[in-house]
Amino acid sequence: MESAVEQTKILARELLESGRVAGILALVSEQGRIRPGFLQRTEEVNDLVLEPIYLLAPLARTIQTMDSQATVGIVARGCDERALVELAKAGQMDLERTVLIGLACDEEIAQRCGCRQPYPREIDVGTRINHTPAEGSSSAAGEKVDWTAELARCLKCYGCRNACPLCICPECKLAVPMWVQTGVVPPDPLSFHLIRAFHLVDKCVDCGSCEDACPAGLPLRKLHKHLLRMLEERLGYVPGMQVDRQSPLFPNLWCTPFLDSKIPRWMSTLGENGSGEMRGE
């Protein structure tokens, strides 16, 4: 029986040979180092690897931005697919020009990551694993946390923002002195972490990139999981699960801004007709 990586290589070669995609986003091993790569020739597929987990969705967005005609293949885990869905809702991705090789996480990875749905909707490689993080695990939402003590360790490096696939505002509110005081470390949690958490609550796909990037080791996924659980329980909404369902929070933001006012630059990620051109002030 072929391994998951060999199955993925076969599918990647088939996509390239068919001409359906301009290239395939995947992890590659090169001279003992693993990095993301955009494979455009079949011989490059020989270097494809599947671990460690690395979110590739933001790179797909970058490639489509650079080439408006390119169809991008991507080796996508469940978190990648959910991120692509949310990027598409924000007008940042064209899913019609995205071809997925759906990769289901194995039991070990699912347990380690704590993702509730460690598989994409259509699985090409691997097997669906139904996994619910145990209460008290490193990624469980129910574990009690002393947030005052935890957030006091923040270095204000913006690593969480920079690593997040859904932090896509052209002008980040966290960098505006009116909202977040400059030169203060740690930042006030109400004007930094909670602003960021609430701004992302209806977009967060629980990929863990923010927590992985944090040099202070803040349990940021727990914070987001609390809000995601409230969003699901109260409004029945889970980000990244439905392409055709918009967020129940500010559902009319784009068509009827508050009091017919213009959308502030930091809130607007869409241009006219989804072109990406800024339309806010």
Image: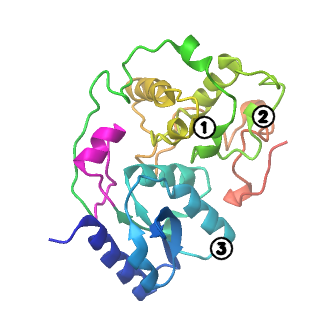
Start-end of magenta stretch = 103-124
Residue 55 percent coordinates (x, y): 49, 53
Residue tagged 2: 175
Query: Looking at the figure, which quarter contains the N terminus?
Result: bottom left
Task: Tell me what residue is drawn at x 47 percent, y 39 percent.
Answer: 208
- For this orientation, the residue located farthest to the left is 1
Question: Of tags 3 and 1, which is closer to the observer?
Answer: 1
Residue tagged 1: 160
Q: Amino acid at mark 3?
A: Asp
Q: Quadrant of residue 207?
A: top left
Q: Are marks 2 and 1 in contact (CB under 8 Å)?
A: no
Disc 2 from disc 1: Cα separation: 13 Å
- Badge 1, how many Cα within 10 Å: few under 14, some, many 20+? many
Q: Amino acid at mark 1?
A: Cys
Query: Looking at the figure, which quarter contains the C terminus?
Result: top right
Q: Quadrant of residue 131?
A: top left
Taking 78 as reference, is 257 left or right? right
Residue tagged 3: 67
- Is 53 inside the magenta-drawn segment? no
Task: Tell me what residue is drawn at x 36 percent, y 26 percent.
Answer: 140
Q: Are marks 3 and 2 in contact (CB under 8 Å)?
A: no
Disc 3 from disc 2: Cα separation: 29 Å
Query: Where is 135 relative to 272, above or below?
Result: above
**Who comes first in sequence, dot 3 or dot 1?**
3
Query: Where is 267 relative to 30, above or below?
Result: above
Question: Of tags 2 and 1, which is closer to the observer?
Answer: 1
